[in-house]
């Protein structure tokens, strides 16, 4: 017990030495560099992409079951599908969501229990819809 306490005290003392501080800083820097390097690897990009695709797909499937395709025409390419606000310009939402897009938006939808006023539309249908509303 006494030994343990003495050990702890000497550890604290050691952690205050410049030598330790320097080592700690070095570790931090090393870790930072390692992280940055890791973000450049395909493994990391793949993971991020998979995560993004996952949350996107999850949102789309929620709004347009069972497969998340366009709710107007059934278009299926995830890259050209978007989440559309049914009433077009819900002012409050537009203000709230002004600065978020992509994954942040999908996460926002999920955190808000998927508000009902959204739907899945492909770019074509969204464009056509906009023109229709203008007429
Ligand atoms: Zn469509």
Image: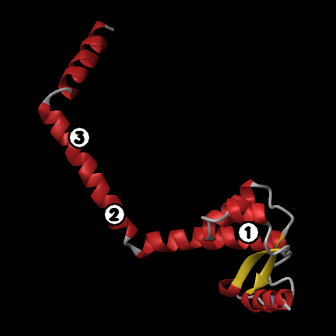
Residue drawn at (31%, 60%) of the image: 34
- Outermost residue toward the left in this view: 19
Colouring scheme, one of rainbow, by chain, secondary structure, one colour: secondary structure
The relative height of residue 4 versus residue 70 in the rendered view (above or below) is above
* Beta carbon at label 1 within 8 Å of ligand 1: no
Q: How many marks?
A: 3
Q: CA distance from mark 2 to mark 3?
A: 18 Å
Residue 76 placement (x, y as % from top left): 76, 88
Residue 114 placement (x, y as % from top left): 80, 61
Residue 37 placement (x, y as % from top left): 32, 66
Q: Residues within 10 Å of mark 2 (few under 14, many from 20)?
A: few
Q: Which of the two residues, 41 or 105, is positioned nearer the viewer here?
A: 105
Sequence-wise, the earlier of marks 1 and 3 is 3
At mark 1, the secondary structure is helix
Badge 1 is on which residue?
A: 58
The relative height of residue 131 versus residue 119 in the rendered view (above or below) is below
Quarter of the rendering containing residue 8 = top left
Q: Residue 24, which numbered label? A: 3
Q: Classify the position of ligand 1 by quadrant: top left, top right, bottom left or bottom right.
A: bottom right
Sequence-wise, the earlier of marks 2 and 1 is 2
At mark 2, the secondary structure is helix
**Discs 2, 1 touching: Cβ within 8 Å:** no
At mark 3, the secondary structure is helix
Q: Residues within 10 Å of mark 1 (few under 14, many from 20)?
A: some
Residue drawn at (52%, 69%) of the image: 47
Quadrant into which the C terminus falls: bottom right
Q: Which of the two residues, 3 or 64, is positioned nearer the viewer here?
A: 64
Q: Is residue 102 visible?
A: yes
């Amino acid at each position: 017990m006494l030994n343990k306490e003495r050990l702890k005290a000497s550890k604290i003392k050691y952690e205050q030495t410049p030598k330790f501080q320097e080592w700690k800083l070095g570790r931090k820097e090393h870790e930072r560099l390692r992280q940055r390097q890791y973000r450049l690897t395909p493994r990391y990009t793949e993971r991020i992409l998979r995560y993004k695709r996952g949350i996107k797909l999850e949102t789309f499937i929620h709004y347009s079951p069972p497969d998340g395709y366009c709710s107007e025409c059934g278009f299926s390419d995830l890259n050209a599908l978007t989440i559309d606000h049914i009433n077009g310009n819900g002012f409050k939402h537009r203000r709230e969501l002004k600065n978020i897009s992509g994954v942040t938006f999908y996460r926002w939808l999920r955190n808000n229990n998927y508000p009902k006023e959204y739907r899945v539309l492909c770019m074509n249908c969204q464009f056509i819809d906009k023109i229709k509303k203008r007429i």
